[in-house]
Image (cartoon, rainbow, N blue to C red):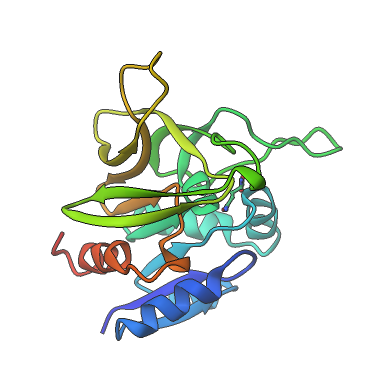
Amino acid sequence: MTVIGVLALQGDFREHLNALSGLGVKTRAVRTVEELSAVDALIIPGGESSVIDRLTRSYGLAEPIKERLAAGMPAYGSCAGMIMLADRLENPAVSSAGLKQQTLGGIDMLVRRNAFGRQVDSFEYPLEFAGHSLDAVFIRAPEALEVGPDVQVLSTVPAPESRAQGRIVAVRQGNLLATSFHPEVTGSRAIHEFFINITQGDA
Ligand code: GLN
């Protein structure tokens, strides 16, 4: 049986573990390289991407995760997790020592962090996602500003009138899925089911 791991260093990993368990999936919290090697797929939760980046590298997990992603491991990132899966960041956090936040990469896109404003600007929006309607929750959410030719745009929200296209909030590239919003904090399981299908090779 497929085991889906959830990177459990920071953020709302418990909500993802609960969502997966509720769908009857075998799950495992991933904090070490050994735990990573025991999973077939990985979810990177919402949280604070600069912290997840720092912890992932200090736990020695960044390179092993990148290797697994390059080898085709399915992965899903929500919010901060979407930022972690972006090949390029428009506005990386910079530490007091001048070090720039890094990502794991994998999805050919340029992402802007906090694209919809601050925590107080969090909002819920009714979205279409792969044939499902769901209320998506955005909390200091990122936006994909540019996507490469191999990236499929799965959901957008309306942009200001000055912009021709909607703002990209859900994407897929091969086995990698990313959403700006947090399905783990709502009742809808459409996104998790979609990801489970990817891990089974059915989507
Ligand atoms: N703005 C956060 C970041 O940059 C992401 C917010 C979230 O995951 N809810 O990591």
Q: Is residue 88 left or right of residue 171?
A: right
Q: Residue at x 64, y 53 (%)?
A: 48
Instruction: Judge by depth and name the residue closer to the eye, 157 or 191.
Output: 157
Q: Residue at x 58, y 71 (%)?
A: 8
Q: Is residue 104 left or right of residue 167?
A: right
The answer to which quarter of the image holds residue 115 is top right
Q: Residue at x 61, y 36 (%)?
A: 117
Give the vertical position of 128 relative to 47 (above or below).
Answer: above
The answer to which quarter of the image holds residue 75 is bottom left
The answer to which quarter of the image holds residue 149 is top left
Q: Is residue 8 left or right of residue 97?
A: left
Q: Residue at x 19, y 70 (%)?
A: 200
Residue 103 percent coordinates (x, y)? 55, 44
The number of numbered discs placed on residues in the rendered structure image is 0
Residue 140 percent coordinates (x, y)? 59, 45
Instruction: Judge by depth and name the residue closer to the eye, 27 or 16.
Output: 16
Residue 168 percent coordinates (x, y)? 36, 35
Residue 39 percent coordinates (x, y)? 40, 75
Instruction: Judge by depth and name the residue closer to the eye, 33 or 134.
Output: 134
Give the vertical position of 189 relative to 175 (above or below).
Answer: below
Of all residues, the one furthest to the right in this rendering is 96
Which quadrant is the C terminus positioned in?
Answer: bottom left
Instruction: Judge by depth and name the residue closer to the eye, 102 or 71.
Output: 102
Give the vertical position of 112 relative to 84 (above or below).
Answer: above
Which quadrant is the N terminus positioned in?
Answer: bottom left
